[in-house]
């Protein structure tokens, strides 16, 4: 079975964890609405815009995107902030269970207990967006991509560093580019479900907070 972190704890305002003398405190931040014209969700590195949508879809519409920030304290003083998770909120209901969000060719039974399926990050950024936005972004010229999403100076505050724009002019599908935790790596996305099996959210875990 694949590794499933304790997302119920991680996605709780004020959640605290301690590891190697560092205290982690989690804070939620609403980034804004995300338009899903097809309802097909993609998680990927948006500055290398490619990705297959997950097998699970949602009704086309407008949803909320939320970042969960880990505030790191060392020796009683705030040290730094990192985005530890990105959540696409589908329904305002608590998740009774979590499982991996899967691509069509992925079988969770093939994974060991400590393994995941995830997308690779090479630019230190991640996103959750509609397939239409990601496909449109793939057609952008690099100069346009750089002008919109690659600032000359990046804020130390990960929320101030978030950049959003409409990626697909035809459908108005938009995208938010966020920092991916500690940077480059491979990150899994999970599906939250109610007890009846309805999807509550898609969550990418950027693996900042230990002991999840």
Image (tube, helix red, strand yellow):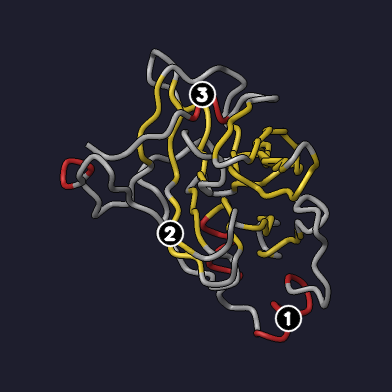
Q: For numbered disc 2, what is the local secondary structure?
A: strand
Which residue lies at the image location 43% right of the left edge and 39% below the top edge? 190
Badge 3 marks a residue whose secondary structure is helix
The residue at 52%/72% (across/down) is 122
Hey, which quadrant is residue 162 in on the image?
bottom right
Task: Kindly identify which residue carries mark 3.
Answer: 8
Q: Pick whichever, 88 or 150, lies toward us.
A: 150
Task: Give yes or no for contact between labels 3 and 1 (Cβ–Cβ under 8 Å).
Answer: no
Estimate how packed mark 2 is, as few (under 14), some (14 to 19) or many (20 or more) residues with alpha carbons within 10 Å.
Answer: some
Residue drawn where x is 78% and y is 50% of the image? 159
In the rendered image, which quarter contains the N terminus? Answer: top left
Disc 1 crowd rating (10 Å Cα; few below 14, some 14-19, many 20+) is: few
Q: Nearer the viewer, mark 3 or mark 1?
A: 3
* Callout 3 crowding tier (Cα within 10 Å): few <14, some 14–19, many ≥20: some
Q: Residue furthest left?
A: 110
Label 1 to label 2: alpha-carbon separation: 26 Å
In the displayed structure image, the side of residue 95 where residue 129 appears, left or right:
right
Q: Are marks 3 and 2 in contact (CB under 8 Å)?
A: no
Residue 46 at x, y percent in the picture: 58, 65
Judge from the rendering whether residue 191 lies leftward or rightward of residue 63; answer left or right.
left
> Which residue bears the numbered disc 2?
186
Identify the residue shown where x is 40% and y is 28%: 98
Residue pointed to by mark 1? 144
Q: In which quarter of the view is residue 179 placed?
A: bottom right
Asked whether the beta carbons under mark 1 and mark 2 sit within 8 Å of each other, the answer is no
């Amino acid at each position: 079975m694949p590794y499933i972190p304790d997302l119920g704890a991680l996605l709780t305002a004020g959640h605290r964890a301690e590891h190697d003398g560092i205290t982690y405190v989690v804070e939620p931040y609403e980034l804004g609405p995300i338009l899903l014209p097809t309802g097909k969700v993609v998680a990927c590195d948006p500055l290398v815009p490619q990705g297959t949508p997950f097998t699970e879809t949602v009704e086309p519409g407008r949803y909320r995107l939320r970042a969960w920030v880990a505030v790191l304290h060392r020796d009683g003083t705030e040290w730094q902030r990192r985005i530890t998770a990105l959540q696409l909120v589908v329904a305002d209901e608590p998740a009774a269970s979590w499982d991996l969000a899967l691509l069509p060719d992925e079988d969770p039974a093939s994974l060991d207990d400590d393994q995941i399926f995830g997308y690779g990050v090479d630019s230190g950024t991640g996103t959750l967006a509609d397939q239409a936005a990601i496909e449109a972004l793939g057609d952008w010229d690099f100069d346009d991509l750089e002008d919109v999403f690659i600032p000359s100076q990046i804020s130390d505050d990960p929320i101030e560093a978030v950049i959003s724009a409409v990626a697909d002019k035809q459908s108005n599908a938009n995208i938010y580019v966020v920092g991916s935790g500690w940077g480059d790596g491979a990150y899994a996305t999970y599906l939250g479900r109610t007890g009846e099996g309805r999807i509550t959210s898609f969550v990418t875990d950027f693996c900042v907070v230990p002991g999840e």
